[in-house]
Amino acid sequence: MFALADCNNFFASCERVFRPELNGKPVIVLSNNDGCAVARSNEAKALGIKMGDPLFKIRHIVEKHGVAVFSSNFALYGDMSRRVQEVLRMFAPSVEQYSIDEAFLDLRGMEHCDFDALAKQISRECQRLTAIPVSVGIAPTKTLAKIASKLCKRYPKLRGGCYIHRPQDIEKVLSTFPVADVWGIGRRSQAKLAQMGVETALDYTRLSETTVRKLFALPGYRTWKELRGEACIEFEDMVEPKQSICVSRSFASEIRTLPELTEQVTNFAVSAVDKLRKQGSMALEISVFAMTNRFKENEPQSYAGRCVPFASPTADYRTIVSASVSACAAVFRQGYGYKKAGVVITRLIQESGHTPSLFEDFDGARKEACLSGAIDSINRTFGPGAVLFGIQGDGSVRMARNHQSPHYTTLWSDLPTAKVE
Amino acid sequence: MHPFPIEESTALEFDFMGEIKAGFPSPAEDVREHLDLRRLLVRHSASTFFFRIDGVSMVDADMDEGDIIIVDRAVEPYNGCKAVCFIDGEYTVKRVEIRPDGAVLLPCNDTNKRFKPIPVGKDDNFLIWGVVTYVIKKA
C-alpha cells in the first residue's frame, strides 16, 4: 500500500497559520513579481479565481469580496513543508517528498493496519501539529493513492483520509474521475483521449493493452497498469541528483542596460552553483538566456541564449560566474527591454565519480575548491548573500513583492506577536 | 527500503573541543557531549513555534513585554496551562481554565484590575493555538 499526503491549497494554508482570522475567507497567493494567482483557498476558487489568473484581471473580484492577497513567501512555505514532512515520518519508515506540498509514504509491510483509520489519523495529526490541512489517500498504487487523496478534497465527510482497495470500490471511483486529472496523463494524451471518447479513468482502464502501448507509450502504459491496481511506479525516497539546474526569474520592470542585466544573471549563476554544489555535481556547460516582454507588442522583441562550455568539469563559483558574465554580454542587445532572464547549467556529472584528465591544472583546481568551499560555509553560517561577487550588486533579485507576509518561522525579527493587553 | 539521512542542524552549540596538532592526544577526544539549547527548548521540531510578547497582562506569569515564548502544538491543552489563544481576531496569551461548558481565560496580573477573566463558550470564535512550554527573557 502507498499513501499520498497532499497539503490542501498549500501556500494559501501557510498564510492562514498565523492569520487564523482568514479561515473561511478567500485567500490567494501570487507568483514571483506578484504576477498571477498560484494558490487559492477554496473560498477564492468559489469566487471563480482560476489558477494562473493575472492579478490585474481579477482585481475587481479581489476588491469586491475582500480577497486577502499575498506575495509568495517561500521562507514560510519551505519551513511549513519541512514540518509536515516531519509529521509524516512519524507514520511510515519511508517518505518520498514529491513536491513542496506532496509526499508519498511507503506502507508496504504494514498490512496489519486499519488503513482508513490511519489515513484519517495522519491528516488529523498534520492539522493538529502544524495547522496545515492535509488530504491523505491510501491505495495499492501511487496513482490510485493520488486519486484517493483528491476524493478527500471533494468529500469533506471523509475527514481528510480515504482508503480505496476493493476492486469494486476502485471501479466506482474511477467511473466518476476525469481521465484528464489522472497523475501521469499529459496534455498531449488528453487531447488524444478526448478524440477517442475516453472521458473517465475507468474508460482508460478498459482500453486494450495493445492500444495503450501503441498510443501512449511506456508512461501511459504504466499509468494504465497502476489504475488497474498493479504497482509499477517505483518508490523513490532517495533524491537522484538533477541532470540540469535552471535558475530564472522575471523582473519587476524591464532591464535595459548590460550592467543591470549582468548583475541579475550573476545572481542566478551563484544560486545555480550553490544548488550544483549541494548535490555534489560538476558542470560542463552553462547557458544564459534573456527575453523581452512579449505582451508589449509595440516594443522590439528578442529571445536570445548563449552557451559556454567549460574546459573541464567544474563546480567553482568564479569559473561559472565569469562564464555567465561573458555569455550575458553576448546575449544582450542595446535597445531591448528584458523582462526575464536565467541561467541553465547542464551536462552534469557527479564529483565523486570524476577522474581528472592529464592536462588539468590540479593545483589551481584544489585552490578553487578551497575558495568555493569557504564561500559555501560563510553563506551557510551567516545566511545566503553574506559574501558576494562585486558584480552581483547587493545580491537581490529585482522582484515585486508588495504583499509579502512576515517570515514568521525563519527570522527572529519577524516572529508573530501575542498581545497580552 | 533505504535509511533516510538524519539532518541534525543545531543553530546553537556549545562545543569546546579543539584540534590538537601534536603532543599528548586529548583524553577527551572521544567525548561527544555538548549542551544544545535547541534540544532543551524544542521537544518537537514539527510543532514548535516562537512568538513575541506584546503587553503586560501576564507579568505575574513571568511573561514580560518583548519576551519570546516557545509554543508547542503537540502538547494537549491542560487545566491551568498557559496558552496562545486566538480570540477576537488576535493572538493573546492567557492561563486557561478548562470547564465542562467551555473555558475561562485568566490574565496573570494581580496589580492591575483592568485585566478581567474572559469566559469563552463552545460557540465563541475562539481557538487554543498552542501551549506555552518555555519563556525566553533577557536577564
Image (cartoon, rainbow, N blue to C red):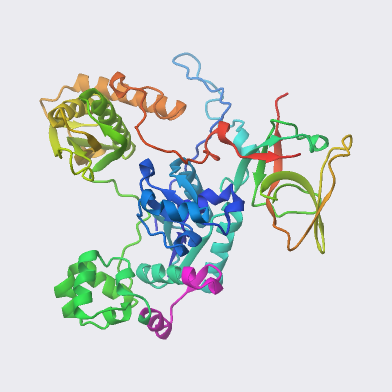
Q: Residue furthest top?
A: B23
Q: Main secondary structure of the magenta part?
A: helix
Q: Which one is nearer the viewer's eye here, A333 or A372?
A: A333
Q: Residue at x 36, y 53 (%)?
A: A57
The reply, left or right, for residue B131 in relation to residue A30 is: right
Q: Residue at x 42, y 57 (%)?
A: A102
Which of the image's four quarters has the N terminus of chain A?
bottom left
Counting from the top left corner in percent of width and height, residue B43 is at 63, 44
The residue segment tinted magenta is: A152-174
Numbered label tally: 0
Q: Is residue A157 magenta?
A: yes
The reply, left or right, for residue A175 in relation to residue B53 is: left
Using the image, determine if residue A109 lies above or below residue B108. below
Using the image, determine if residue A130 lies above or below residue A324. below
Which of the image's four quarters has the C terminus of chain A?
top right
Counting from the top left corner in percent of width and height, residue A153 is at 48, 68
Using the image, determine if residue B102 lies above or below residue A299. below
The reply, left or right, for residue B18 in relation to residue A326 is: right
